[in-house]
Amino acid sequence: MNKRRRREIYPSQVIRSKSFGDLPEDVMSIIFRKLGIIEVLLRTQYVCSSWLKLAKKPHVYHSVVIQHKSYDYHYHFEKFVKKAVDRSCGQLLQFSCDRPICISKGLLLYLSSQSFSSLKYLRLGSQTYVSNAVLTEAVKKLPLLEELDVWINRHHPKKLIRELGCSCPQLNYLRLNYHDEIEYTCDCKEFAITKDERESTCDCYAFAIAKELPQLLHLRLTGWVLTVNGLQAIVDGCTHLKFLDCRKCVYLGLDVDLLKICASRIANIWLPESRIIEDL
């Protein structure tokens, strides 16, 4: 018995078959966001002239979210991102990427320079690699940045924290995630770090955050080297904190007196043992 060959259907083909060409622009804008910027640039904009016209409007690119399961366009990644940034015409508010790829210096600096007067949210997922040095240079051009969520290694993050304090006065949400895989799975030389360097970084970044970023409301330090001294510095320095996540932080013990202080000042705290203190 002959088996029928399964045909792959792309989102743009489904849309074309349903004849959505006459839908209002605001509805189509929502559909474009659901499809994702890559799908819009690859296929959807070519369905009809009205969609091509809409795909060139800046408001469509206020938020650029590149998901992990997007189509395989590795070799054209920079081309698509730059095209989206160009079409935003300086109105890009959010950039988020979950692709397993190493972000080049040229691309990140292009994004920051073209969006210096608009970008408020920057997120690079656990498989999207960028060196601390490049990220530090990029945030110099983002004075309106309010939220930063990145996975980095421990190679000179103090410079990044210091630059955030100098260049991003509106930053209120900071998530600096760390895991060992970043240092060994990326080909970029910036990620090379020795065992001695890892062990010598205890608390120094917590002290830097407490000194440079006292305005923070939301702080996540998942997987970092941290002791009670570092936690004390953060609590004393970042007096506006409402949420603190220090899960998987190496060497962080449980000091009863410090926990009482944390509970009295911070509404939500995640501890290394995944226990949470809320509204105490």
Image (tube, rainbow, N blue to C red):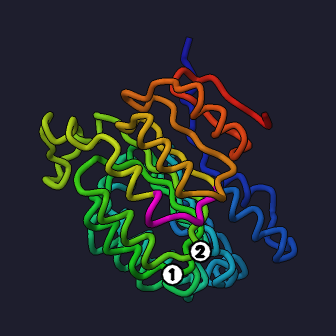
Q: What residue type is labelled 1?
A: Pro
At 55% across and 19% down in the image, what residue appears?
Answer: 3
Residue under label 1: 143
Give 243 or 76, whichever is nearer the viewer. 243
The amino acid marked with disc number 2 is Gln
Q: Residue at position x 62%, y 53% from top? A: 218
Residue under circle 2?
170
What is the distance, in whole Å, between disc 1 and disc 2 at their CAs? Answer: 7 Å
Range covered by the magenta-colored residues: 210-217
Using the rendered view, name the quadrant where residue 75 is placed. Answer: bottom left
Q: What element carries label 2?
A: loop
Q: Position of residue 109 (x, y in %)?
A: 34, 77
Question: Could you say which is closer to the camera, residue 42 or residue 110?
Answer: 110
Report the quarter where the N terminus lies: top right
Q: Is residue 153 visible?
A: yes
Name the residue located 51 percent from the left edge and 31 percent from the top edge.
Answer: 247
Q: How crowded is mark 2: few (under 14 residues within 10 Å), some or many (20 or more)?
A: some
Relative to the observer, which residue lies in front, 22 or 182?
Answer: 182
Q: Do the residues labelled 1 and 2 touch (CB within 8 Å)?
A: yes
Q: Is mark 1 on a helix, strand or loop?
A: loop
